[in-house]
Amino acid sequence: DIVTTTTHKTLRGPRGGLVLAKKEYANTLNKACPLMMGGPLPHVIAAKAIALKEAMTISFRKYAHKVVENARTLAEVFQRNGLRLLTGGTDNHMLIIDLTSLGVPGRIAEDMLTSVGIAVNRNTIPSDASGQWKTSGIRLGTPALTTLGMGSAEMEEVANIIVKVLRNITVRSN
């Protein structure tokens, strides 16, 4: 009935979001959104319109397929190296690595990967005993790398670097 999405990640538009809803929710949303959001910025609205128009093109469709192909390549390399993926693979632009077997908290993995130039987000997993701050997983996606023109060969390299970093983290107990 209601869908929210960002406009700056997979869609490749300006930083922001969209709320899509059935007409029956229009009045409620129209009352809530002005109170919770800043004023309309015409240049941002125009940029979102351009991003949405581009999303209707054949080239965007090819890009979207490449994003998924790249995510699947990452998944294959991670699984080949013994890392557990939360869903056993991926059918979209992102994946979550369960770090439980490595004994590495998501927060530390996020920090270490950031230190070598790889952006990931710590992410909770089902029944996560580590909580939201430490977490037992990390989430990563392929839209940005795909936009830069990277393909399967580069994804293999990136995945191997991630595996190497994760396997070489030493967690000290306090």
Image (tube, helix red, strand yellow):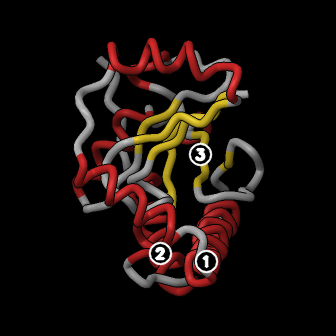
Q: Which mark is residue 66?
A: 1
Q: Nearer the viewer, mark 3 or mark 1?
A: 1
Q: Amino acid at mark 1?
A: Lys
Q: Which residue is at 59% across, 45% downward?
A: 96
Residue 57, position as x, y percentages in the image: 59, 78
Per the image, label 2 sits on a secondary structure element best described as: helix
Q: Earlier in the sequence, mark 3 or mark 1?
A: 1
Residue identified by numbered label 2: 146
Q: Residues within 10 Å of mark 2 (few under 14, many from 20)?
A: many
Q: Is residue 10 above or below residue 36?
A: below
Q: CA distance from mark 3 to mark 1?
A: 19 Å
Q: Which residue is at 64% across, 20% downward?
A: 25
Q: Amino acid at mark 2?
A: Thr
The quarter of the displayed image where residue 61 is located? bottom right
Q: Amino acid at mark 3?
A: Ile
Q: Which residue is at 45% across, 82% downward?
A: 150
Residue identified by numbered label 3: 96
Residue 136, position as x, y percentages in the image: 53, 30
Q: Residues within 10 Å of mark 3 (few under 14, many from 20)?
A: many
Q: Is residue 121 above or below residue 38?
A: below
The quarter of the displayed image where residue 75 is located? bottom right
